[in-house]
Image (tube, helix red, strand yellow):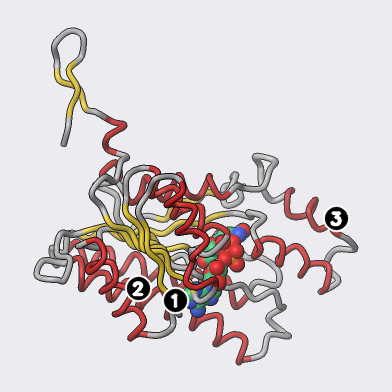
């Protein structure tokens, strides 16, 4: 832990430094666009070297190019989070490219956009597979790698992307809410396990409100398609009304929270659920 010297000669904690990730290696899933892209850029901006993965865009090639253009170091990998051998390969890529794995952000996810009464079992299962099984596999392989004796072996932090929809009911998001509720519970169990077994790994979940990424736009469109709002303006107004701060979120709102949870600033935070939602859950 580094410290500064105050003008009166007393030691003071270098708090800014506690948020930096110099020398750390971070893996972000679903990093080709939206929140994952911004999270990868954010972690790079505070010093981490990045493995960006995605099922699309060559595994997040455009994000890697943006990181390199800003002076950071990153590689990408095509990676379906439901595929266990692909997880083993992604973790191995982090270790072979940069010598470690210190931070995992389980960000990849999909939404449902259908009413419970209309959701097919195939659609329900697909959402659980990507959002829940994908997050479980990430936790499993990151914990193995980060724990003492693992391929990285120096502890770390896992941030699981849940949602406000895990904590409150959202119409047309039954399958999605169920999946994000499972991510919340998995996070707490993994956090307790890692703490009790001395893995040196912290595990926390993030619960964003609405951000107008491709997924956020899909949610708005879904309200219109399902006849729950007559047009775009009405859909936006209805969803905005759920957010007491009076605006939708921006990817930087979520990325800033990831920096905190990934860093030493959150060194005593594990099993927590952090709402980044403009007040949705508080209302
Ligand atoms: N946008 C929001 O309002 C919001 C709110 C709360 C939580 N979230 C969560 O944040 C995360 C990111 O959302 P976003 O808004 O950036 O969505 P997005 O649709 O813009 O991006 C999701 C990314 O995940 C990738 N992906 C999908 N399936 C995958 C798979 N099987 N393997 C690997 N990658 C896969 C996609 O290719 C895409 O790049 C998701 O977990 C989402 O549920 C989003």
Residue 116, visible in the rendered structure: yes
SS for callout 1 = strand
Residue nearest the viewer, comparing 105 with 69:
69
* Of labels 1 and 3, the one closer to you: 1
Residue that carries the numbered disc 1 in the rendered image: 78
Above or below: residue 108 compared with residue 22: below
Residue 233 at x, y percent in the picture: 85, 53
Residue count near mark 2 (Cα–Cα under 10 Å), binned few <14, some 14–19, many ≥20: many
* Sequence-earlier tag: 2 or 1: 1
SS for callout 2 = helix
Residue that carries the numbered disc 3 in the rendered image: 234
In this image, 245 relative to 260: left or right? Answer: right
Marks counted in the figure total 3
In this image, 160 relative to 115: left or right? Answer: left
Residue at (32%, 58%) from the top-left corner?
26
The answer to whether mark 2 is within 8 Å of ligand 1 is no
Residue at (64%, 65%) from the top-left corner?
215
Residue nearest the viewer, comparing 246 with 101:
101
* Sequence-earlier tag: 2 or 3: 2
The answer to whether mark 3 is within 8 Å of ligand 1 is no
* Cα gap from disc 2 to disc 1, whole angstroms: 15 Å
Above or below: residue 155 compared with residue 85: above
* Sequence-earlier tag: 1 or 3: 1
* Cα gap from disc 2 to disc 3, whole angstroms: 38 Å
Quadrant (top left, top right, bottom left, bottom right) of the N terminus: top left
Residue that carries the numbered disc 2 in the rendered image: 138
Residue at (53%, 57%) from the top-left corner?
35
* Of labels 2 and 3, the one closer to you: 2
């Amino acid at each position: 832990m580094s410290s500064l010297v105050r003008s009166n000669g007393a030691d003071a904690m270098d708090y800014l430094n506690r948020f930096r990730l110099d020398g750390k290696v971070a893996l972000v899933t679903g990093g080709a666009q939206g929140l994952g892209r911004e999270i990868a850029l954010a972690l790079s901006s505070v010093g981490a070297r990045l493995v960006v993965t995605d099922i699309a865009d060559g595994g997040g090639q455009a994000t890697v190019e943006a990181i390199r253009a800003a002076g950071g170091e990153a590689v990408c990998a095509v990676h379906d989070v439901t595929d266990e051998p692909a997880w083993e390969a992604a973790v191995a890529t982090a270790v072979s490219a940069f010598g470690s794995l210190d931070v995992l952000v389980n960000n990849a996810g999909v939404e449902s956009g259908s009413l419970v009464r209309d959701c097919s079992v195939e659609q329900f299962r697909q959402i659980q597979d990507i959002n829940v099984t994908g997050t479980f596999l990430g936790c499993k392989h990151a914990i193995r790698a980060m724990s003492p004796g693992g391929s990285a072996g120096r502890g770390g932090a896992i941030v699981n992307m849940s949602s406000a929809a895990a904590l409150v009911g959202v119409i047309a998001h039954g399958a999605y809410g169920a999946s994000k509720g499972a991510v919340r519970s998995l996070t707490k169990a993994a956090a307790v396990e890692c703490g009790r077994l001395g893995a040196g790994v912290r595990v926390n979940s993030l619960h964003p409100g609405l951000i107008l990424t491709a997924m956020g736009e899909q949610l708005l469109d879904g309200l219109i398609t399902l006849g729950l709002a007559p047009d775009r303006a009405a859909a936006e107004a209805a969803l905005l009304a759920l957010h007491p701060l009076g605006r939708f979120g921006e990817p930087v709102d979520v990325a800033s929270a990831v920096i905190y949870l990934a860093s030493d600033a959150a060194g005593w935070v594990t099993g927590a659920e952090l709402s980044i939602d403009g007040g949705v859950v508080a209302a």
